[in-house]
Image (cartoon, grey):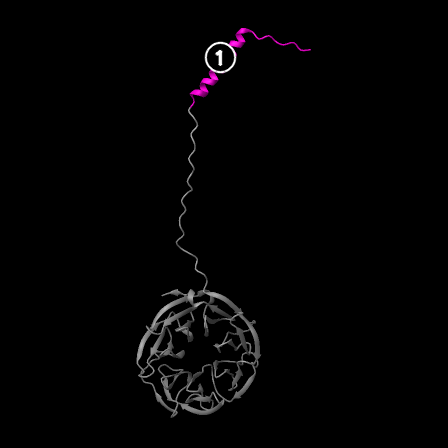
Amino acid sequence: MAKWQRVTPVAAVAGALLVLVLVGRWLASPAPRERAPVAPKPTTATTATTRPSPIVATVRLPAAEGEIAALAFDGGSVWVADQAGGALLRVDPEANRVVSRIRMGEPQAGPWGMVAAGGGVWASFEEGTVWRIDSRTGKVTDKLPVLNIGSFAVGDGALWSPCCETERPKSSGRVTRVDLATRRVTAKIGIKGNPYTAAVAGNSVWVAGSLPNSMWRIDPARQTVSTVKEGYARSTTLRMAAGLGALWIGNPDELLKIDPGTGRVLATIGLPGRPVGLALGLDAVWVSTDTGALVRVDPATGRVAASLQLPEVGSLGSLAVTPDAVWAASGRSILRIDPARLRAA
C-alpha cells in the first residue's frame, strides 16, 4: 500500500505564492471587450438590367434550298408561302408551330406571292395561275389564269395582281382585277412598263414598276391609267402598302409617306438598309430590311418610334402582324417578335 508523501513547509509556501501571482494577473487584466457586430460590405446596385429578348418564339421550317416568299395573317392563322418547298404552311400563332401543310407543286415552282383577303388565302405560281385556299378548311377552291410575280393589292372589293405581259415582256405589262365576291377575273388593264408591286389607297390603285420612277395610278371605276410624275421612286421601288391614312412606299434606304388624295410626300423616313418586308398593324408601320433590322414607324408623326437590330440573322424577310406580335421571315425560320420589347428610338 502506497504511503502519503509529506509536503515540506517551503514547498507549501511556494505553491501559495504561485496561486497569488496568477490570481493577481487575472484581476489586473482588463475585462474582455464585447465585439461590435461587423457591418456587411456595401454592395453596388446593378443599374443595367438584362433586357428580355424581343424574339419570343422561333418556328423552323423543313430544310430546303431557298427562303420564305411571303407571310400573311387571315385573322386566325399565320400563313407561310414556302416557295422553296412548294407548299403553303399554316402556323398556329398561339402554339407557335406549323399545324398543316398544303402541297402546291414542285419545289421552287411557288408559291411566289400571297395575300389573305375575302375569307381566303391567294397564292401565285410560276406557271401563271393564282390559287385561292379557303382559310377555314384549307381546301383549294379556285385556280385562276392570273399572272403574278409575287405582289398583290387588295381594295375596292377586288384583288389586284400586277405582272409582266408574257407576249411582250419588254414593252408592256398589265394589272389583273379579280372580284373577291365572285372570285372571277373582271378586268385586265394594260400598263406601258413592267409593273410588279401595287397598293390601293385614296380610291386609286397605285402600281410601281421595275425601273426607277416608273409608277402609275389606276382609277378602279373607269379602269383608266395615268402616269405618276412626282418621281417618288428614286430607285427601284421595293414595297408598297396602304392604310393608316397614307400610302407607304419602300425605296432603298427610305420609306415615303404619301397623301393618297393629293399625292404629296408627307414624310421621308430613313431606313437602315433596303426594305424587304412592309406591313401595317398594331397602329404602326413595320419595315424589315436586308441588314436584319425591324423598324416601327409612327404613322401620325412619320418618324421611327422603335427598332430592333438582329445582325446575327442576316436579312429579315416578309412580315405579318397579329394582334400581339410581329412575325418576320428569316431564312428557313419565322420569328415571333414582341413589339413591346423593341428599343425606343
Specify whether residue 165 is in view.
Answer: no
| Residue found 60% across the figure and 7% down from its top | 6
| Residue found 44% across the figure and 20% down from its top | 27
Is the residue marked by circle 1 packed among few (<14), some (14-19), or many (20+) residues within 10 Å?
few
Say whether residue 24 is magenta: yes
Residue that protrudes farthest toward the right in the picture = 1
Q: Which quadrant does the N terminus fall into?
A: top right
Q: Is residue 89 left or right of 175 when viewed as pictured?
A: right
Q: Please state which of residues 34 and 41 is positioned toward the viewer in this rendering.
A: 34
Q: Please state which of residues 309 and 72 is positioned toward the viewer in this rendering.
A: 72
Amino acid identity at mark 1: Leu
Specify whether residue 338 is in view.
Answer: yes
Q: Is residue 88 above or below residue 224?
A: above
Which of the 4 quarters of the picture holds residue 162? Answer: bottom left
Residue 108: image location, x then y, percent:
54, 79
Residue 285: image location, x then y, percent:
39, 74
Secondary structure of residue under mark 1: helix
Give the residue at mark 1: 17
Q: Is residue 87 left or right of 180 when viewed as pictured?
A: right
Q: Please state which of residues 324 and 191 is positioned toward the viewer in this rendering.
A: 324
Residue 318: image location, x then y, percent:
46, 74
Name the main secondary structure of what is drawn in magenta. helix
Residue 125: image location, x then y, percent:
52, 83
Q: How many numbered marks does the figure carry? A: 1
Say whether residue 5 is magenta: yes
| Residue found 30% across the figure and 81% down from its top | 264
Extent of the magenta region: 1-29
Q: Which quadrant does the C terminus fall into?
A: bottom left
